[in-house]
Image (spheres, grey):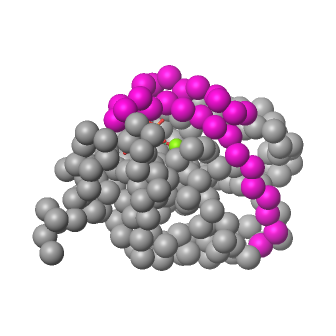
Amino acid sequence: MSNEKLSIQVKDKEFIPYLSEETILARVKNIAVQLSEDFKDKNPVFIAVLNGSFMFAADLMKQLHINSEITFVKLASYIGTQSSGKVLTLLGLDTNVKDRHVIIIEDIIDTGFTLKKFLPVIKANEPKSISICSLLIKPESLQVDIKADYIGFEIPNRFVVGYGLDYDGYGRNLKSIYQLK
Ligand code: IMP
Ligand code: MG
């Protein structure tokens, strides 16, 4: 079957398959194994950044076999397929992370503005450590000096949807990741 046939429509745009469900889940499992080793007996707190990371966070947590907590914050920076550069906190941190090992879970690091803005907020809560775990990163798009500790896939600077990531609110339910055609 050609990619032409497998392409999907999300709102007004066409997307082609990019990372399959199996590929994603295999990588998520790898990361979970790594985290389980690195944070064994450290009782970390995961902070998942909504909305985009919900599916990644759920699959990652299912594969973890260490004591840990998870909480959520909701940040927004995107309008359509463009980063707005402005980061809004729609739901803030409600968990005490003082002296805890914090692991931030993101769906994707694009310009890096979201994390750049969010990191000082976490730091102000005096955690023992902060690590960043992002399913995707677009190295060519990065505009700030952010270093992720755990990365699923480095991808080219092209808009993607699926597995939690949206185009204008749609496409989050897709089991695999699609790239703008
Ligand atoms: P940043 O602040 O530019 O790093 O963007 C971070 C947020 O923008 C991510 O957490 C996503 O929610 C969203 N985003 C960035 N690139 C994409 C994409 O290709 N598809 C869908 N959402 C994206
Ligand atoms: Mg996000």
Q: Quadrant of the N terminus?
A: bottom left
Closer to the camera in the image, 103 or 73: 73
Q: Please provide percent x and percent y for residue 79.
A: 41, 29
Instruction: Say if the magenta span includes residue 136.
Output: no
Residue 108 shown left or right of residue 155 in the figure: right
Q: Please provide percent x and percent y for residue 19.
A: 34, 65
Residue found at x 86% / y 43%: 96
What's the magenta bit mostly, secondary-structure-wise? strand
Residue found at x 68% / y 40%: 73
Residue 151 shown left or right of residue 132 in the figure: left
Question: Is 80 rendered above or below residue 147?
Answer: above
Closer to the camera in the image, 117 or 4: 4
Instruction: Say if the magenta span includes residue 76.
Output: yes
Residue found at x 83% / y 43%: 95
Question: Is 127 rendered above or below residue 176?
Answer: above
Task: Write down which quadrant ligand 1 falls in.
Answer: top left
Is residue 153 at least partly visible in the picture?
no
Closer to the camera in the image, 135 or 166: 166
Q: What is the quadrant of residue 67 in the picture? A: bottom right
Closer to the camera in the image, 95 or 35: 95
Q: Which residues are magenta?
A: 66-92
The number of numbered badges drawn on the structure is: 0
Q: Please provide percent x and percent y for residue 98.
A: 86, 44
Q: Please provide percent x and percent y for residue 54.
A: 59, 53
Residue found at x 37% / y 32%: 80
Question: Is 110 rendered above or below residue 171?
Answer: above
Residue 152 shown left or right of residue 123 in the figure: left
Is residue 21 at least partly visible in the picture?
yes
